[in-house]
């Protein structure tokens, strides 16, 4: 069974631009969560989607948004990029909320210049 | 508050056992996880334990949970050079929703001949 797939693997953007990251969960998984990993702050929860609804949100500004499609695939968007948004963005999927472990993808490395 | 603490570095000799320790703060946490991260990669789920268990064994991995002390440990038997990586402990506070993981800063395991 294929794992969690994130595209693209690497992105370089300029301050002020916006970016969209994509995540395809493991087949059959309906919950998708997003995390940001930086050297300074470590791993931080961004948000979780289940059945196309945002179920939970972390402490990030409104520039960070996401959505989930009917096939459980998810995208996250960051608008008006700042240098501090440079990070590894990780997507995780699980069968459903709360009753199954999270499996992570390899992430998208975003660099903002 | 929610906080997970781990020692930052552990060095072991190949063939020895490694023990990585973690303390967490939220007694309501249902699942506790161990993830492994190799350079340039995402998070690999190693194992997880439900809060009503004291121990879980999976091949070379043994997880011990002391709920009273809020202490979690991961023992890797017969440690190999391929085990060199960063290991993250994570808790799932009930208040945050099951898929909002709170991660420690990670323990870097170095295995030397």
Image (cartoon, coloured by chain):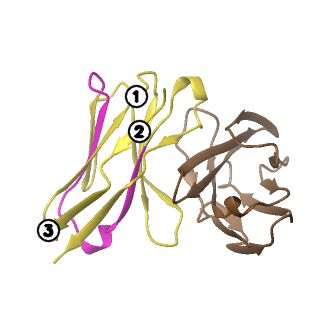
Chain colours: A brown, B yellow
Left or right of A69 on screen, residue A49: left
At horizontal 30% and vertical 25% (from top left) the residue drawn is B67
Q: Residue B113 is drawn in which quadrant?
A: bottom left
Q: Is residue A18 left or right of residue B93?
A: right
In the rendered structure, find residue B15 and report the number of the disc placed on it.
3
Mark 1 packing: few (<14 Cα in 10 Å), some, or many (20+)?
A: some
- Chain letter of the residue beneath label 2 in the structure image: B
| Residue B25 - label | 1
Alpha carbon separation for disc pair 2 and 3? 29 Å
Q: Residue at x 26, y 68 (%)?
A: B110
Lower position in the chain sequence, tag 3 or tag 1: 3
- Please report whichever mark, 2 or 3, sits nearer to the chain's N-terminal start: 2
Question: What mark, if any, has residue B3 been given in the picture?
Answer: none
Which residue position holds label 2?
A: B4
What's drawn in magenta, residue-wise? B67-89
List x then y, in percent, for residue B8.
32, 55
């Amino acid at each position: 069974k294929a794992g969690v797939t994130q595209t693209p693997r690497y992105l370089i953007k300029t301050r002020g631009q916006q970016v969209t990251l994509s995540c395809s969960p493991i087949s059959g998984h309906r919950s998708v969560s997003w995390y940001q990993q930086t050297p300074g702050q470590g791993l931080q929860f961004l948000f979780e989607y289940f059945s196309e609804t945002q179920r939970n949100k972390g402490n990030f500004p409104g520039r960070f948004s996401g959505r989930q499609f009917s096939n459980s695939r998810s995208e996250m968007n960051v608008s008006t990029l700042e240098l501090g948004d440079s990070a590894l963005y990780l997507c995780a999927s699980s069968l459903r909320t709360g009753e199954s472990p999270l499996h992570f993808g390899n992430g998208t490395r975003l660099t903002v210049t | 508050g929610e906080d997970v603490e781990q020692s930052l570095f552990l060095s072991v000799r190949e063939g020895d056992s490694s023990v990585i320790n973690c303390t967490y703060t939220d007694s309501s946490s249902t699942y506790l996880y161990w993830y492994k991260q190799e350079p340039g990669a995402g998070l690999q789920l190693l194992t997880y334990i439900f809060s009503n268990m004291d121990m879980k064994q999976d091949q070379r991995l043994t997880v011990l949970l002391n709920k009273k002390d809020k202490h979690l440990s991961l023992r890797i038997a017969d440690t190999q050079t391929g085990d060199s990586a960063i290991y993250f402990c994570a808790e799932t506070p009930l208040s945050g929703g099951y898929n909002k993981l709170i991660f420690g800063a990670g323990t870097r395991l170095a295995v030397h001949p």
